Amino acid sequence: MTAETASPDRPAPEPDDRPLRERVPLGPKGPIGVALDPMTWRAVPYLFLSLFLGLAWLAVLSVAVPVSVAMVVVWVGLPLIVVTILMWRGAAMLERRILRLAFGVRIPDPYRRRPEGGFVRHLDWLFGDPATWKDLGYLLLLTPLGALEFFVSLLLWTSGLALLSGPLVTALGWRTTMGVRLGYGSVAESVPWALVGAAILVVALYAVRGMTWLHTMLANLLLGVDEQDHLRAQTEYLRASRARGVHTAETERRRIERDLHDGAQQRLLAVALDLGRARAKFDEDPEAARDLLASAHAGTKEAIAELRDLARGIYPAILTDRGLDAALSSLAARAPVRVELSVEIAERPPPAVESIAYFIVSETLTNMAKHSRASEASVSVRREGVQIVVEVADNGVGGARAVPGGGLAGLADRAATIDGVLIVDSPPGGPTRIRASLPCTW
């Protein structure tokens, strides 16, 4: 099974935080830069084909929507409307992928999370999501927008290429090129028009970038994440994340108090009692006093060991002194099974990230030893962009779950304190893979 446990309510897909006009750049400046930019030539086929995509979606919707609405009077109408909505949602999702290929702009799917529950709640989710109707608006606008892009592209490219190829066509004795009839009497007469064609092609390049920018602006507005919805979801996510962080810190404080009270404090109290009794018997019964001193000595060593373990559970000294690689190597060496360790981080991350990464590995290896019946495990820590990714895998029996109050849920709470995400992938029969993505800025 796979569970994402960073937050009880994941926010809507996060868009680029820059303003929209900066999110959709016009591209490089200068004709040479525009001509050499691969994005220009990736956009050209789309601008020619967008009209036909729009006509296809318009034809389908112009039949599906009226028929579905008309059939509402009988029982099949509502399912048809649902199928129609899912169809145009699918078309919008496909359009986002096509735009990414053509324009290089990523537009995440903006849909709200599907609710738990029955058919009525799903209908409310489907009809009540503004993204559903914005998808429809975009698909209907794609035809007039595609017509504009198609005819502007056709006019500029064909006229520019026809005029530019005039000298060559005239030299070959042809009279037409690209469907345009040329009436030049000589090659020299065609050269000035070739320069005009070159200028038109430069205009065509800028027109491609301009239409790409306008199209992408519209797509971001209609197909992208609504800024207000995103801010609202992000606020809820941060509120839940901070609440879980406070809860984690409080739980950790109570655990430390309990361990001190029930463990080291009780042992030190027993040591004090043994020392007091030994002092009382020192003159009368030296042998009994010697036994009590031995018991106090053993109790002191046990209390020291418990305090050492408790300190390691708070923040291990080796992590502070030598960093994550050495601390994880120490964990791997103490593990009951063979652990393959890989740490690929050139610079030390901030202490909070190091600490969370360490405890994720520590708790996961502890759970593995208790429950997984694994014979080997692997630990990988690496940097991916502005994140530290921690992956722990084993070949055990699987079935691990992040249940409230459990160890894995506690790790998710730790990760949530810095807006991290913990994913547990542990199908029955194994293997188990736990992945944590921890935001990190050096």
Image: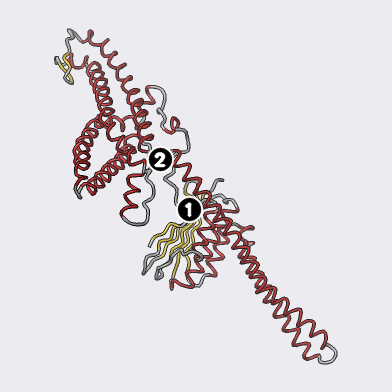
Q: Quadrant of the N terminus?
A: bottom left
Q: Are marks 2 and 1 in contact (CB under 8 Å)?
A: no
**Which is more toward the observer, 139 or 215?**
139
Q: State the mark number for residue 315.
A: none
Residue type at mark 2: give it.
Val
Locate residue 432, reporting x and y percent: 41, 65
Left or right: 346 as drawn, with respect to 259: left
Locate residue 190, reporting x and y percent: 23, 10
Pointer 1: residues within 10 angstroms few (<14), some, or many (20+)?
Answer: many
Locate residue 435, reporting x and y percent: 45, 58
Name the residue furthest front.
73
Vertical arrangement, residue 180 with respect to residue 14, above or below: above
Q: Secondary structure at mark 1?
A: strand
Left or right: 362 as drawn, with respect to 44: right
Q: State the mark number for residue 225.
A: 2
Vertical arrangement, residue 188 with respect to residue 376, above or below: above
**Which is more toward the observer, 141 or 64?**
64
Distance from the alpha carbon under mark 2 to that under mark 1: 23 Å
Q: Which residue is mark 1?
A: 437
Left or right: 126 as drawn, with respect to 440: left
Locate residue 188, reporting x and y percent: 23, 8
